[in-house]
Image (cartoon, helix red, strand yellow):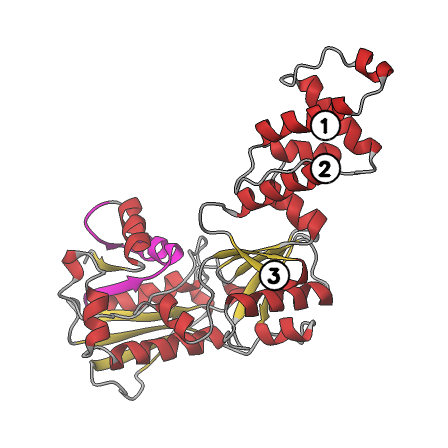
């Protein structure tokens, strides 16, 4: 079982992509129609309704429907209009200008923008966010135009429709496009319709710790065998897991001269581990274990840097400190983790792009330091 799947079964994680529409109704958007496709179809049907044009096809083609709309417009012409628009062929830009003009006459303030959506010059997803109040869901990442208490409750209703047993501690990363702001909000706060302060302290860190424990406890049961089948053949002989080295890429050097890294050896709580060493810099930590199943002396199980201190080189400093302990490996389950450990000399056969591709194919990839 990989970390993402474990979060799903623990009620912390959504699967798939959806639109959350008015009233909290969730529409699947990860199949034949994506977020954009669903929004485009909705725009087409809205325009069709204005001109009393109907089509029973599952997916409506705008080029075909526009001809039906032009015919409906011409059928309503009086003699003066019929003479004025006798040049109509149904296949020129002037034809579509006529549709826009008629939509404006009917009181549609977004007529121009809708047509631009249909011809791909305006993002259909942004249109739906802005004008209909829809919200995109991509797993635990959500996009919305505003984030009022009403928006929050609508999102909560949609999430419950997607996954009824979602935990109230589940965290969602919400991008508010109308304000160019980002929030991390718990399900509890969404249901309440207000942000009640910071999320539970170190929630992600606790979940990673619980994940490491759950994985090692399951190392001898059938789940382990099933998970190994998903790995590259080169890693199938390794015990799964070696832990999850999760961290964002650091770009700048950290001032080591004014900060000392503390080293501690906690009590061993898992029979799979022969030893454990923690490197601390304040609340930031890198944990590694001596895993008797691993091909290296040590395996990184966690790299955690406080969100407010990221991109300062702290993770790089912690890795440098641990590299003096012997041969090291790191199981990376996100692209940022792969990039960070690759930068510090951890490798597989191939290039960085190969490592990222393998990580995306198998959900995680084990990198081994070149020493």
Q: Is residue 212 above or below residue 235?
A: below
Range of residues picked out in magenta: 326-350
The span from disc 3 to disc 2 (Cα, nearest Å) is 26 Å
Are discs 2 and 1 less than 8 Å apart at CB? yes
Q: Residue at x 54, y 48 (%)?
A: 35
Q: Along the horizontal axis of the image, is 260 left or right of 46?
A: left
Question: Along the line of sight, which residue is nearer the eye, 158 or 290?
Answer: 158
- Packing grade of label 1 (10 A; few <14, some 14-19, many >=20) is some
Which corner quadrant of the image does residue 331 belong to? bottom left
**Residue 119 visible here:** no
Instruction: Tell me if residue 330 is in the magenta stretch.
Output: yes
Give the image location of residue 369, x and y in percent: 22, 59
In the picture, which quadrant includes the N terminus? bottom left
In the picture, which quadrant includes the C terminus? bottom left
Choose the circle earlier in sequence order: 2 or 1.
2
The span from disc 2 to disc 1 (Cα, nearest Å) is 8 Å
Q: Along the horizontal axis of the image, is 77 left or right of 53?
A: right
Are discs 1 and 3 less than 8 Å apart at CB? no
Q: Residue at x 53, y 40 (%)?
A: 59
Which label belongs to residue 15? Answer: none
Mark 2 residue element: loop
- Packing grade of label 2 (10 A; few <14, some 14-19, many >=20) is few
The span from disc 1 to disc 3 (Cα, nearest Å) is 33 Å
Q: Is residue 280 above or below residue 230?
A: below
Which label belongs to residue 72? Answer: 1
Q: Dot 3 corresponds to which residue?
A: 25
Mark 1 residue element: helix
Instruction: Tell me if residue 238 is in the magenta stretch.
Output: no
Q: Dot 2 corresponds to which residue?
A: 52
Question: Along the line of sight, which residue is nearer the eye, 328 or 353?
Answer: 353
């Amino acid at each position: 079982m990989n970390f993402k799947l474990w979060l799903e079964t623990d009620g912390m994680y959504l699967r798939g992509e959806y639109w959350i529409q008015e009233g909290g109704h969730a529409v699947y958007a990860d199949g034949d129609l994506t977020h954009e496709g669903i929004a485009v179809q909705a725009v087409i049907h809205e325009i069709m309704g204005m001109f009393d044009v109907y089509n029973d096809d599952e997916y409506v083609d705008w080029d075909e429907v526009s001809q039906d709309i032009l015919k409906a417009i011409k059928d309503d012409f009086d003699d003066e209009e019929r003479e004025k628009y006798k040049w109509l062929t149904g296949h020129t830009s002037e034809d579509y200008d006529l549709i826009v003009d008629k939509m404006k006459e009917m009181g549609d303030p977004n007529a121009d923008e809708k047509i631009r959506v249909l011809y791909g010059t305006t993002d259909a997803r942004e249109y739906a966010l802005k004008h209909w109040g829809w919200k995109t869901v991509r797993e635990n990442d959500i996009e919305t135009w505003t984030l009022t208490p009403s928006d929050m409750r609508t999102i909560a209703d949609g999430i419950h429709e997607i996954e009824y047993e979602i935990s109230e501690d589940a965290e969602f990363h919400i991008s508010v496009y109308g304000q160019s702001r980002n929030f991390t909000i718990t399900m509890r706060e969404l249901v309440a319709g207000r942000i009640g302060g910071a999320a539970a302290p170190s929630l992600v860190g606790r979940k990673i710790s619980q994940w490491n424990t759950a994985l090692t406890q399951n190392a001898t049961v059938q789940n382990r065998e099933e998970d190994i089948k998903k790995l590259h053949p080169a890693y199938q002989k390794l015990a799964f897991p070696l832990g999850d080295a999760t961290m964002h890429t650091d770009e700048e050097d950290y001032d080591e001269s004014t900060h000392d890294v503390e080293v501690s050896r906690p009590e061993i709580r898992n029979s799979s581990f022969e030893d454990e060493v923690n490197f601390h810099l304040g609340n930031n930590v890198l944990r590694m274990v001596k895993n008797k199943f691993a091909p290296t002396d040590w395996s990184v199980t966690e790299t955690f840097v406080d969100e407010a201190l990221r991109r300062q080189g702290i993770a790089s400093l912690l890795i440098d400190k641990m590299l003096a302990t012997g041969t090291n490996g790191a199981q990376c389950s996100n692209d940022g983790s792969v990039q960070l450990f690759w930068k510090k000399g951890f490798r597989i056969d191939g290039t960085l792009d190969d490592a990222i591709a393998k990580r995306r194919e198998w959900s995680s990839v084990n990198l081994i330091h070149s020493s």
